[in-house]
Image: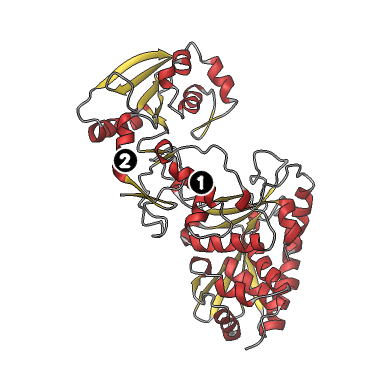
Amino acid sequence: MNEINHIKAYLLGLLIGGGKIDKDTFLIDLPFKKWGMEPKRMNIIAADILTKICQNFNNSYNFNVTYEIGNNKWLIKPIAGADISPLIQDLEFLNLPTGGFLLATVDLTTAKMNLSGISVESFLSGIFDTRASLTPSHRRFDDDAPVVSVEIPGSTKNFKLVVQLCSWLTDLGSITDQILYNHPNQHSGSDPYYKGWKKGFKIRFLVKSFLAQHSFALQAKSIDITIIEKQQKKEEQPPCYLRRLKQVSPISIHCEQNSEELPAEVRNKIFFHYHHFCAVLGCLHAPNDEIAKLVKMKNSLISFFPRLSKGTSKELKTIFENIQSSSFPNKELNNQIFIVKSLVEDEIFKGFSGLDLGIAYLFAPKLNGKRHVGNMDEIIEASMEKTLAIISIGEDFDSPLLIVNTSNDRAVICSSIGIKVNQELIKKHIKTDNLIVNIV
């Protein structure tokens, strides 16, 4: 067995990050659309592939690769008849998968133990070149916080890989800015009926933190990251294990909390924060004490009803009537008219945490999908004297609310964590085991 030198390590990283293996051939997908600010640098990308990738395959594994362009991708594959068995042997040596979409089954344990020195960074650079995105949409609120986002498709269902990769990078000195896990508690924490939650995994680093420890091998990406590095003015967060978690938003239990799209280790469990996933999945860098505090606060952080669902009055009325029949069978619907000012100022509605966003949606002059466009406070202030139809279950507002703007047929459902039925459901159906919060 030949030593896995840094050139081979890079090629193996490319294959892990974007490769599929089928029998005696493979395909590596380089999604240049997400590479950076100017993805049309075709000549630089082509030169990268010819000098960095084609030559390296030829020199290290004695076969040539070709590439083709299509559908915003560069697809790299070996020439017909190439013997890829030495490459397969190196994958096996590192206990890496040798068939199918490699990201879906990869376990980095052996690679982390056996790679050393420059080979470690070369292997990771291969993953970065295939999976890291520099698109302008990756910002922490503004352009002063440009981000490198390592993106892993949700279809892999590989939560373990995300934790392994982030932990490895942290061991090497990087500071993770944020992780997004492919789970409804992260991508749909307030609306339990939102079907578009499968948005994949993202491990995000502020650019300077990334560049302090890591690099891209491909020139096209290196050019763009040095440009956006100059924009960064925001400071890094503390290391993960020293984080003090700010006030977190309550989680509505999603209708697909038990989806087969979720692996067993996260299925039918509730997670209050991205670090909660890290802690439950065994990352040594997770701020476990902070997560333990959140778990103890579960009665104020879990809702069996929508914190905020948006849609048309017809769509939400059906949902609301289902809530009534299943959780409030002995109570009737109660209809009232309120002006916005009363909703905002009345103490009885203070516990409805999604109310402000809901009002902004109901009255915004312009929407982006179901998000209001413009300043939330300004929209609410301009709507203070306008009226809304409020439907509660019973007369005491101890239930979710259906709120309708009859002038444009927009509606929202929102609820308070503290309502009696919700607290009863928490007591009956939520069980904790150390940091794990189960739905039973």
In the rendered structure, find residue 427 and report the number of the disc placed on it. Answer: 2
* Distance (Cα) linking label 1 and label 2: 21 Å
Answer with mark 1 or mark 2, whichever residue precedes in sequence: 1
* Residue shown at 60% from the left, 85% from the top: 86
Q: Disc 2 residue type?
A: Lys
Given this view, does label 1 or label 2 mark the residue nearer the observer? 2
**Who's the residue at 46% across and 29% down the image?**
353
| Residues marked 1 and 2 touching at CB (< 8 Å) | no
Q: Quadrant of the N terminus?
A: bottom right
For label 1, count other residues whose C-alpha is less than 10 Å away and answer few (under 14), some (14-19) or many (20+).
many
The front one of 122 and 77 is 122
Specify whether residue 207 is in view.
yes
Give the residue displayed 30% in from the left and 17% down from the top: 335
Seen in the picture, residue 334 relative to 436 is either above or below; the reply is: above
Q: What amino acid is labelled 1 in the image?
A: His
Secondary structure beneath disc 2?
helix
Query: Percent position (x, y) of residue 435?
Result: 45, 52
- Within the image, what quadrant is residue 298 found in? top left
Numbered-mark total: 2
Q: Tell whether 114 sits left or right of 24.
A: right
Image coordinates of residue 331 in percent, x first then y, are 22, 25
User: Which residue is the extreme one toward the bottom?
Assistant: 1
- Report if residue 187 is visible in the image: no
Residue identifier under label 1: 273
**Other residues around mark 2 within 10 Å, as few (<14) / some (14–19) / many (≥20):** few
Q: Secondary structure at mark 1?
A: loop
* Residue 378 pos. (x, y %): 59, 20
